[in-house]
Image (cartoon, rainbow, N blue to C red):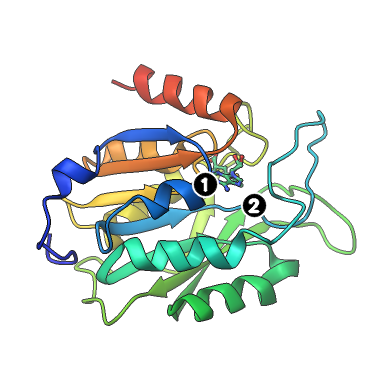
Amino acid sequence: MSNTNNNFNQEILIKRNSLIQGDCLEVMAQLPTRSINFVLTDPPYLVNYKSRDGRKILNDDNSNWLKPAFAEIYRVLGRNGFCVSFYGTNQVDKFIAAYREAGFSIEGHFTFAKRYSSSSHFVRRQHECAFLLAKGHPKKPSNVIGDVIDMQYSGNKLHPTQKPISALLPLIESFCEPQGIVLDPFAGSGSTLLAAKMLNRSYLGIELDKNYHAIATKRLQMSS
Ligand SMILES: C[S@@+](CC[C@H](N)C(=O)[O-])C[C@H]1O[C@@H](n2cnc3c(N)ncnc32)[C@H](O)[C@@H]1O
């Protein structure tokens, strides 16, 4: 794995293909520096979201975790590695401040186009967004993807903000080399982890909510 520092034995310190229940700040603090090849994450959007059926998202009502989380993401990411982070558009200033303070440069921006609208107020919301962040100077991917990606409706059955696997696959394929390890510290129902598994990448997930941790664990087991 060219992106990582090979001065330690990763296999001892990181259990590949695992999903840990806990606070990602505490769990990432135990991970070795530069031990991850690619981070793909969908953190709380800081909007105090409540789905139509009443489901809520932990830590969506405060930003205390935001800067410390991206500082840890930056530390554990390999030298010259990428992170793709979804974010809430009306809190973009807070997300950008956290990325920059951690040390990331902003190298691109993805629009995930939906044929449906997730909510409607002044406009019908028909897209999701994510930044492409870089640590150091990553190599150009061998397959360069477009920055507009189709986002099918996941159904949100497993999680109120469940991302469809199909929208995540091109990101992992492009930004994580085949032997690499993908981290999602805000794993939810495990969509990133399942996408990584489907592409034969290793994964490491962290999820605070016991219910979603159990759902994601079962989902991963059933995909075997
Ligand atoms: C936007 S959701 C991710 C949904 C996921 N992309 C999916 O497809 O299911 C963010 C998740 O982060 C979790 N979370 C919030 N704070 C956390 C923390 N400090 N550590 C780990 N997970 C956390 C929430 O419980 C929630 O499931």
Q: Quadrant of residue 162?
A: top right
Q: Is mark 1 within 8 Å of ligand 1?
A: yes
- Mark 2 crowd level (few <14, some 14–19, many ≥20, 10 Å Cα): many
Instruction: Identify which residue, 165 or 81, lies in the foreground.
Output: 81
The residue labelled by disc 1 is 186
Q: Amino acid at mark 2?
A: Pro
According to the picture, the residue beneath numbered tag 2 turns out to be 44
Are circles 1 and 2 on residues that touch, CB within 8 Å?
A: yes
Q: Is residue 101 left or right of residue 28?
A: right
Q: Quadrant of residue 135?
A: bottom left
Tell me which residue sits at (59%, 58%) in the image: 113
> x, y percentage for residue 173?
28, 54
Residue 154 versus residue 207: which sits nearer the camera? 207
Question: Does the rendering let one see residue 224?
Answer: yes
Q: In front here: 169 or 43?
A: 43
Residue at (39% x, 68% y) in the render? 74
Q: Is residue 47 left or right of residue 209?
A: right
Residue 2: assigned label = none
- Expressed as whole percent of the image width and height from the top left, the position of residue 87 reads 61, 62
Q: Is mark 2 within 8 Å of ligand 1?
A: yes
